Image (tube, grey):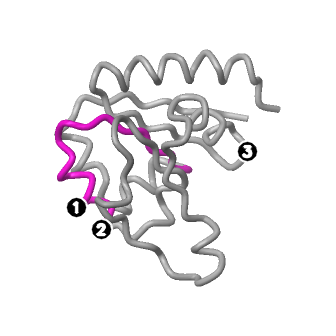
């Protein structure tokens, strides 16, 4: 079971890292607390397209116009079209953001490792 107090403490650390200009990657299986941390660290600034994917079955593109000002988060990053995700995030060289993925393998298969190698980053791995 996810420990809410632990999640709030992690979210506070994430907010600090975002404030300092880091990219934060939260890795964890389903129900490990990724979304909880995103909601606490970037309230109201989460890009989430799960329902869109469930309805259409098509991976949505990430458009720069959809990105809120300031630090933001992307939930279930693996559901997005990898090319649009990488090109949009790559253009945000001065912005801090938080992404949630289910495993390091997802990051590698999407090619996100190239994107993150250019930035100061914090990786947090959650377990149930």
Q: Nearer the viewer, residue 40 or 111?
A: 40
Mark 1–mark 2 CB contact (< 8 Å): yes
Instruction: Report helix, strand or loop for mark 3.
Output: loop
Q: Is residue 47 above or below residue 43?
A: below
Q: Is residue 68 left or right of residue 35?
A: left
Q: Which residues are magenta?
A: 84-102
For the residue pair 70 and 80, the one nearer the viewer reads as 70
Mark 1 or mark 3, earlier in chain: 3
Locate residue 54, reporting x and y percent. 65, 75
Classed neighbour count for the residue bearing mark 3: other residues with Cα under 10 Å, few (<14), some (14–19), many (≥20): few
Q: Which mark is residue 84?
A: 2
Q: Is residue 30 above or below residue 97?
A: below
Confirm or deny contact between disc 1 and disc 3 (CB under 8 A). Answer: no
> Mark 2 or 3 closer to N-term?
3
* Residue placed under numbered mark 3 in the picture: 31
Q: Which mark is residue 87?
A: 1
């Amino acid at each position: 079971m996810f420990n809410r107090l632990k999640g709030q403490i992690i979210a506070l650390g994430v907010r600090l890292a975002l404030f300092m200009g880091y990219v934060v990657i939260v890795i964890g299986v389903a129900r490990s607390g990724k979304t909880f941390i995103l909601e606490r660290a970037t309230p109201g600034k989460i890009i989430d397209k799960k329902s869109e994917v469930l309805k259409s079955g098509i991976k949505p593109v990430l458009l720069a116009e959809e990105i809120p000002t300031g630090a933001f988060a992307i939930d279930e990053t693996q559901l997005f079209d990898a090319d649009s995700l990488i090109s949009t995030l790559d253009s945000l060289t001065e912005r801090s953001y938080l992404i949630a993925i289910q495993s390091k393998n997802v990051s590698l298969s999407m090619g996100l490792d190239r994107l993150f190698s250019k930035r100061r980053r914090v990786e947090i791995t959650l377990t149930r």
